[in-house]
Amino acid sequence: MAQGTYVITKFDLLKIVVDECPRAGELLAEYGLHCVTCFANEFDTIATGAEMHSMTDDDVDTMIDEINEQLDKEWQEEQKKGHVIASEAKQSV
């Protein structure tokens, strides 16, 4: 079964997100959650980290939606690249 794009929620532990999807960690850091590299990331969820950075619930929801959209967009682009490469390989055989 093909695996789809990585999806985060505000309840995810920061460490798990960073370990499983480093790109999601980069995007969280772009939103100011530099705690993705903090020792406490093993215990803090995205929501907890955001709260420590004075983000409102609405801010967190918006951030999560935007990051998931970006992850999906990047995943879709990778799928298209893979399809093109596979198609070109078939033609050269």
Image: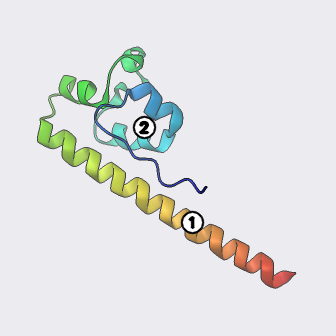
Locate the N terminus and report the quarter of the image it occupies. bottom right
When the figure is inspected, residue 82 is found, relative to residue 54, above or below; the finding is below
Toward the front, the furthest residue is 1
Locate the C terminus and report the quarter of the image it occupies. bottom right
Give the percent coordinates (x, y) of residue 28: 35, 39
When the figure is inspected, residue 71 is found, relative to residue 73, above or below; the finding is above
The residue under the point 46% across, 47% down is 6
When the figure is inspected, residue 82 is found, relative to residue 32, above or below; the finding is below
Q: Is disc 2 in contact with disc 1, using a CB cutoff of under 8 Å?
A: no
When the figure is inspected, residue 68 is found, relative to residue 37, above or below; the finding is below
Q: Quadrant of residue 32?
A: top left
The residue under the point 30% across, 31% down is 11
Q: Which residue carries the number 1 mark?
A: 79
State the separation of the CA atoms marked 2 and 1. 21 Å
What's the amino acid at mark 2?
Gly
Could you tell me which secondary element the residue under label 1 belongs to? helix
Q: Earlier in the sequence, mark 2 or mark 1?
A: 2
> What numbered label is drawn on residue 25?
2
Q: Is residue 80 left or right of residue 89?
A: left
Give the percent coordinates (x, y) of residue 67: 34, 49
Could you tell me which secondary element the residue under label 2 belongs to? helix
Q: Residues within 10 Å of mark 1 (few under 14, many from 20)?
A: few
The residue under the point 20% across, 22% down is 52
Q: Is residue 17 left or right of residue 58?
A: right
Give the percent coordinates (x, y) of residue 57: 13, 36
What's the amino acid at mark 1?
Gln
